[in-house]
Image (spheres, coloured by chain):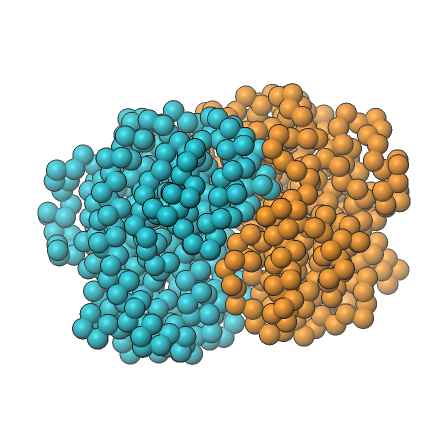
Chain colours: A orange, B cyan
Amino acid sequence: VTKSGASAAAIEKGNYRHFMQKEIFEQPTVVAQTLRSYVRQLERTVALPQIDFDITSINRVTIVACGTSFYAGMVAKYWFEMFARVPVDIDVASEFRYRDPVLEPGGLALFISQSGETADTLAALRHCKEAGQTIAVVVNVPTSSMAREADLLLPTHAGPEIGVASTKAFTCQLAVLAALAAHFAVKKGRLSKDEERAIVDHLLEAPACLNAALDHDDDIAQMAHLIAPARDVLYLGRGPDYPLAMEGALKLKEISYIHAEGYASGEMKHGPIALIDDHVPVVVLAPSGPLFEKTVSNMQEVRARGGKIVLISDAEGIAEAGEGCMATIEMPKVHPLIAPLVYAVPVQLLAYHVACAKGTDVDQPRNLAKSVTVE
Amino acid sequence: VTKSGASAAAIEKGNYRHFMQKEIFEQPTVVAQTLRSYVRQLERTVALPQIDFDITSINRVTIVACGTSFYAGMVAKYWFEMFARVPVDIDVASEFRYRDPVLEPGGLALFISQSGETADTLAALRHCKEAGQTIAVVVNVPTSSMAREADLLLPTHAGPEIGVASTKAFTCQLAVLAALAAHFAVKKGRLSKDEERAIVDHLLEAPACLNAALDHDDDIAQMAHLIAPARDVLYLGRGPDYPLAMEGALKLKEISYIHAEGYASGEMKHGPIALIDDHVPVVVLAPSGPLFEKTVSNMQEVRARGGKIVLISDAEGIAEAGEGCMATIEMPKVHPLIAPLVYAVPVQLLAYHVACAKGTDVDQPRNLAKSVTVE
């Protein structure tokens, strides 16, 4: 396990070809070191680093972020509502700050940003502070403006992220948000002591599951040539996998310049299915479970129109629906609170290997800046 | 002014080449006939058709819909919050029904559907009814399942819509939602009598403004060849124009099979800008006003990367930022409560003429059904 912080070793590429690749492979380590601040391993309880903060009075959460951090926030919305029954509003920062949102007293406003300096997010934070909201931030830079202005600082310990396309910061954000969802659920009386211990065990399994996902690096590199020639790719998911579909599409856009778009699986019939032909690969993120059957019927619709599918699922899902897919990627079977962390890995690796196959500048994609500090 | 209802005349194409074209041109008429149920012209007040419904106790609105109706709902979220200060949650039906959303007592759940039969939306309606929410529906078929199961029926009077890609149903939905937003605002004491009268005047101007927008049909037909060769198109907007950007992209996807994607203008820097080169036209929806300058800076970022812009704005906006655009489309200067209705017209016409230029089957696009009554 490496130490956090901008040490010289942490900002060299080592044996990796790109920073992005290195950062993808650091995820088991940095997610483990992030979770260490949010889980008491001996007691098997979740706890916030700032233990004097009383979360029980919070009845509504407003999440604001941009880009990849926004998709981490979308996953958190599912978790907070599912586990803690706390309703969540979410908006992209550039929209939130100008739409004069209705903010009810007693709300928690939660901002997510790798740098802690994203201009629109910081402006939204200040707007919420003036409106009397309690301010929480999930940031990777503990000395950032957002960290300084927060009531509740929830740091990620991803270490410096150099690749412009965010990877390890995203999974560390998800780790913090999963722990926060569990903490909320405990404090709101929605989880028994036993259930809390089970959740903690699942969270602590995340690094091993991330390693299992990384074991598919070679397979994914082998299938990159199936996606690299595409001009357009769709990503589909349901529930917490819907934001992951959007994040997967964003990764591919950012570094391979392929026009990828993420959709809620159930929305495909309402328009985007018109795009489907044998030139548009469809990446489906679908762990087995109660909604899997719905997604299988969406896959059949894609296939009936000549669409080629990459199915990312667990062994059970692949056994049920893998036949006839262009490719499958098998993930370990995991708890819903860590599935988004684990499923982030194959979409990152797929974007990475497709970009390598296309020969783009992976760490410095065209037109993009690492931290967007202008509006 | 024509009568509503499925008369023989209403389901023939007349002098139009396609039903979609006919339905686009019917919008001034059907929006006027829809508004007639929601506005008392002599008193210059807004009123719901079902006048015994007391809306004052509603403190939160949950909007659920699919496809184009979902984008009408997104516009409504901006309006309800801006004019009535009533907070709004919104979700696509296929996600809403499976995420076990937190529904607070006293909420209004609002469902939007042309057919009133959309399977996922109907299932979401029934879920909300069981959870004790008050049920309102905006539907075009008053005998539909949703209409029958609603507490508050808010019909659109668009007449039968034959084209698979929804056009006149969308603007009629917006007309109902604008009147509902104004009614909410009056009942919540956020609009004075004078302000209400001014709003009613603006609503009643909508049909004339839609006609002014339709006057650009020839110009838009002329510029279709600029978009038709593109494989990918981005649509950008801020505030209520952000959902319109998504709707514009959906229309182009549905009938021209070009991969178009709508984005909040301020999110472009967080990823999609990597796609921009001189092969990716960018359609910008931006009425002049306080946010126009922000959008101009987004346009400059696009232009700096070789991107070609189609700017849809009013005379003032085009005077300020039209130079250097590949094309501009001038809309009348209108109140924010009717701008989305008016700006819907050029994106519909653009999609229509691009599809005609490509020779696709406009009224029966591949893979799509008019009413999605399966999950």
Place residue A20 in its image quadrant. top right
Relative side of A328 to B148, left or right: right
Q: Quadrant of residue B43?
A: bottom left
Residue for point 33% across, 36% down: B351
Residue farthest to the front, as pictured? B319
Q: Nearer the viewer, residue A245 or B120?
A: A245
Q: Position of residue B33 (x, y in %)?
A: 19, 59
Residue A359 coordinates in the image, percent (x, y)? 65, 20
Where in the figure is residue B113, as x and y percent of width and height? Answer: 34, 55
Q: How many marks?
A: 0
The quarter holding residue B330 reads top left
Residue sitting at 42 percent across and 44 percent down? B320
Q: Residue shown at 33%/72% (left/top)? A: B195
Question: Is the residue B162 above or below the residue A89 in the image?
Answer: above
Locate residue A349 relative to residue A1 in the image: left or right. Answer: left
| A178 up-or-down from B264: above or below | below
Front residue of this view, candidates A295 and B162 = B162
Q: The N terminus of chain A is located in which quarter?
A: top right
Q: Is residue B228 visible?
A: yes
- In the figure, B353 relative to B123: above or below? above
Is residue B27 something one can see in this rendering?
A: no
Residue beneath the point at 80% across and 27% down: A16
Residue A71: where, in percent of width, then height?
61, 48
